[in-house]
Image (cartoon, rainbow, N blue to C red):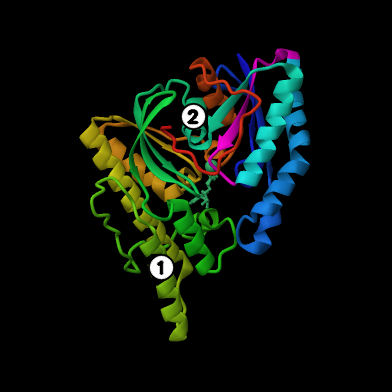
Amino acid sequence: MKILAIESSCDETAASVVEDGRKVLSSVIASQVSEHIIYGGVVPEIASRMHAQAISGVVSKAMSDAGLGFGDIDAIAVTYAPGLIGALLVGVNFAKGLAYSTGLPLVPVHHLRSHIAANYISHPELEPPFLCLVVSGGHSHIVAVNDYTDFSIIGRTRDDAAGECMDKSARAMGLPYPGGVNLDKISKDGNPELYKLPHPHVDGGEYDFSFSGLKTAVVNIIHNASQKGEQISVPDLGACCIETVADCLVGNTVKAAENFGFKKIALAGGVSANSRLRARMGKVCAERGWELFMPELSLCGDNAAMVGSQGYFEFKSGNIAGLELNAFATMPIDG
Ligand code: KG4
Ligand code: ZN
């Protein structure tokens, strides 16, 4: 079964054709980074306009790269939630137009579910159940993936997402957007013990996270240094920040895996590209004899191949939308 998938939840306009949920026949991504860089973050209105300009060409290229016509496609999958509402609506409306004109079924896909599905492409042997740490710019969840379309949230952030914490910390250090990526690069050889940062404790939520205090601590170190006319070391502070985030993410994931009996662990979302997080997770899993699944780097960030993968499993479970499908800025993964 071949699915044409569309993704426009944030600042990437993407389309892909995926066969049977695991085989990518084409994947096209038009990134808007160069448009948002001068603002230091994504400007929602600009994102929507850029999606509207790019989507037709991106979808056409995905079809021609796959060497297929609409007669060869079995369904249209689209990210409908969560994300920037104006951005999502561009993809959803384009997909609805295609579904109407071709008569193909329309499959709504949850953005975080699709991040998890990136692992099905990178690891064709991976099947649920497994435990997944989903870390993106807007979300940080520990999720039990009971089945392809059955999820339970075990832990979540109480405030900022891990990606947001790294993006804002990077900005305070003077690094350009997208902060997390640049923080990762610059801090590769930094000393992760030079600066003392708080390890947040969350009352009453054994597996929950809190990252806003960490972000504030980083900003305070920078302000205190500048008031005293001292220089901070960006590679060292960056390494400390990422190491602290990784401590929290890895610590809670290990605790959840032990307590819920998972020996298959996965990472997903944009932050899963982080080199320290990948290394730390690799180490703890190897020490315990657990299997670890991580998407290849090109599938960690937003793309449509992962939407085509999850779309396949949603379709098989009967999740098909009518032309009244709407987009939603928020939506629980286990809804
Ligand atoms: O999944 P994603 O592409 O978009 C959302 O759904 O939010 O995640 C974007 C987030 C941003 O916060 C970005 O800085 C972060 O992922 N990110 C990274 C790295 N690559 C992307 N954070 C740390 N290290 C990286 N290498
Ligand atoms: Zn994402």
Query: What is the magenta range?
Result: 71-84
What label sits on residue 216 in the rendered view?
A: 1
Where is residue 310? Give x, y as percent. Answer: 52, 26
Q: Image quadrant for the N terminus? A: top right
Judging by the rendered image, the residue that carries numbered circle 2 is 117
Tell me the amino acid under the disc marked 2.
Answer: Ala
What residue occupies the far left of the structure in this picture? Answer: 259
Q: Which residue is drawn at 35% across and 46% down?
A: 280
Q: Residues within 10 Å of mark 2 (few under 14, many from 20)?
A: many
Comparing 126 with 138, the one in front is 138
The part of the image, by quadrant, that contains residue 103 is top right
Q: Image quadrant for the C terminus? A: top left
Is residue 278 something one can see in this rendering? Answer: no
Where is residue 186? Give x, y as percent. Answer: 51, 60
In the image, residue 74 lies in the stretch drawn in magenta: yes
Q: Which residue is drawn at 46% across and 48% down?
A: 274
Where is residue 243? Give x, y as percent. Answer: 37, 56
Q: Which residue is drawn at 67% across and 32% down?
A: 15
Label 2 sits on a secondary structure element that is helix
Where is residue 21? Give x, y as percent. Answer: 54, 21
Q: Does the residue labelled 2 lie within 8 Å of ligand 2?
A: no
Residue 87 as seen in the image, left or right of residue 282: right
Tell me the amino acid under the disc marked 1.
Answer: Thr
Q: Which residue is drawn at 59% across and 34% down?
A: 79
Label 1 sits on a secondary structure element that is helix
What label sits on residue 278 in the rendered view?
A: none
